[in-house]
Structures are given as structure tokens and as C-alpha cells.
Amino acid sequence: MASLNLLPHPPPSSFSSSSFHRLRCNTLLLAPKPFQRRPSFLVKSAVGVAEPAAYSSGYAGDTSDSISSLKLNLLSAVSGLNRGLAASEDDLRKADGAAKELEAAGGLVDLSVGLDKLQGRWKLIYSSAFSSRTLGGSRPGPPIGRLLPITLGQVFQRIDILSKDFDNIVELQLGAPWPLPPLEVTATLAHKFELIGSSKVKIVFEKTTVKTTGNLQQVPQLEVPRIPDALRPSSNTGSGEFEVTYLDSDTRITRGDRGELRVFVIS
């Protein structure tokens, strides 16, 4: 088959130079362009057929890195404060600021669809209420190092979303006359809880039990008699509310009904 000569040369004598120029330009425009391969990103589907990959901006990873950084910043702000017992006014402000940054980055908490994240045993690592030097913070409670020789140990919250049990577990060391060693006990304040709205939790007190540990762990558990309602201070109703302002698989931030900031990590 004879090859096609797109550009005849020399031009016929009947062509003017301007006519030849127009013919050459039109021919170049009609000529097929070289094939250009465009980049494509392919993923292998479940049936083995290559399909275009979904576009991803990468912001998810950036957000995750930001959350991790803010969590580290919060843990750094509350470290060395003995769960808040040793916090100064400046420490309280720094911890509150670090918590607000993490709360803002995490967004609104919706426990109506993520209640299972509450499940488990949580360790309290900071409470702004402890700056008042009482076990209950701004609530009535035995003072630390004033009237009673009490040393506060670890504090936990044990939450069961099926039975609605909500237990505050406090490890205490009670002073004893010399030469007797301090008495180590674990107090469990049992509550039931219910969800109010999307992020608020209400707890209702049921009973307090005390169990000795250490050398006296064989002593049976003791249930502390409940104060009659008529003798109970009006500020101590046996119930309380708090809002979960940040929650993931290992960290939880709550704000109490008296403004208490509490930070927990999964135990």
C-alpha cells in the first residue's frame, strides 16, 4: 500500500504561497496526536478486577496525628500532679486548656451510638476537684492530711454497660498508732447509671463496701451503713451527673456537674 504524503512538495505552480501555508496548517491540525498515557491508580477488587482507587486527601491521617499529639500534651500537663492533689492554680489552668484543645479536636461525643466505648475499668489520672484536698473534691468528703491520716491511692471507675453498674473504686491507706502498720483498704462506691441525651451520664448511689487488702485481705468485706436521707446534707443527694466531652478506646475526659475536670485512661 502506498504511503500517504501529507505535505506535498514542491507545491503545484497553481498554488500561491499563502494557499500552501493554509493547506499545511490545516493538515497539521488534522493529523493524529501522539498517544499520551494518563496516570491511573488501580486497586484490586475482591473479584480480581482492577478498579480505580478512591481519592483520599490524607486528612484522616493528619487528624489522627493531631489527636495523638493533643493527648500527649494533656498527659504531660497532668503528669506529676498526684492526680490533681498537688495542682496549683497555674497547673489547673494548663490542664484545663490542654483538655479543651483535645475536646475541640475530637468533636461532640454521642454515647447513643458509642456507649460500648464506656465499657471497662478506667484509671483516674487527674481530677481538678482534688485541688481542694478532699476525697470528694468540691463534694463533702474526708480531708487529706487534716483530720484523718488518710493517704489516697489509685482511683478507678468500673463501668458495665449491660448491667448499668458504675462503681467508683478508691484505694486508701489509713494511719494507725505506732508500731502498727497503716491499714490498706479498698472502698467501692456502687452506683447505677443512665444516659441522658447524647453525652451526659447520671449516676445514682446504691451502697459503699470496704475491703481490707495487704496483710488483712482475709477479713470479710464490710458494707458501710447508708446515712438516712433525713440526716444527709442537702448537697449530698446520692446522685450526680457528668458530661463525657472526649472519648476514644483508651482516653476519656469528663466534666462534672460542678465543673470538675477528670481525665481517665483505660486500665
Image (cartoon, rainbow, N blue to C red):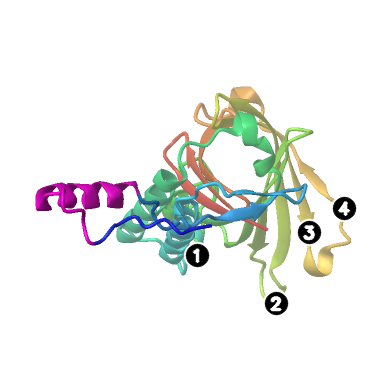
- Mark 4 secondary-structure assignment: loop
Looking at the rendered structure, the secondary structure element under dot 2 is loop
Which of discs 3 and 1 lies nearer the camera? The answer is 1
User: Which comes before the other along the chain, label 4 or label 3?
Assistant: 3
Q: Work out whether mark 2 precedes mark 4 in sequence or the reverse, and give the earlier one.
A: 2
State the SS at label 3: strand
What stretch of residues is rendered in magenta? 10-30
Q: Earlier in the sequence, mark 4 or mark 1?
A: 1
Q: Is residue 126 left or right of residue 203?
A: left
Is 83 a magenta residue? no
> Quarter of the image containing the C terminus?
bottom right
Magenta-drawn stretch contains 24: yes
Mark 1 lies on residue: 82
Q: Amino acid at mark 1?
A: Asn
| Left or right, 33 with reference to 52 | left
Q: Which residue is mark 4?
A: 220
Rendered image quadrant of residue 226: top right
Say which of marks 1 and 2 sits in front.
1
The three-letter amino acid code for the residue at tag 4 is: Pro
Could you classify mark 2 by the number of other residues whose Cα lies within 10 Å: few (under 14), some (14-19), or many (20 or more)? few
Mark 1 or mark 2, earlier in chain: 1
For label 4, count other residues whose C-alpha is less than 10 Å away and answer few (under 14), some (14-19) or many (20+).
few
Q: Nearer the viewer, mark 2 or mark 4?
A: 4
Q: Position of residue 141 (x, y in %)?
A: 54, 45
Mark 4, mark 1: which one is toward the viewer? 1
Q: CA distance from mark 2 to mark 4?
A: 24 Å
Q: Which residue is mark 2?
A: 179
Residue that badge 3 annotates: 212
Q: CA distance from mark 1 to mark 2?
A: 27 Å
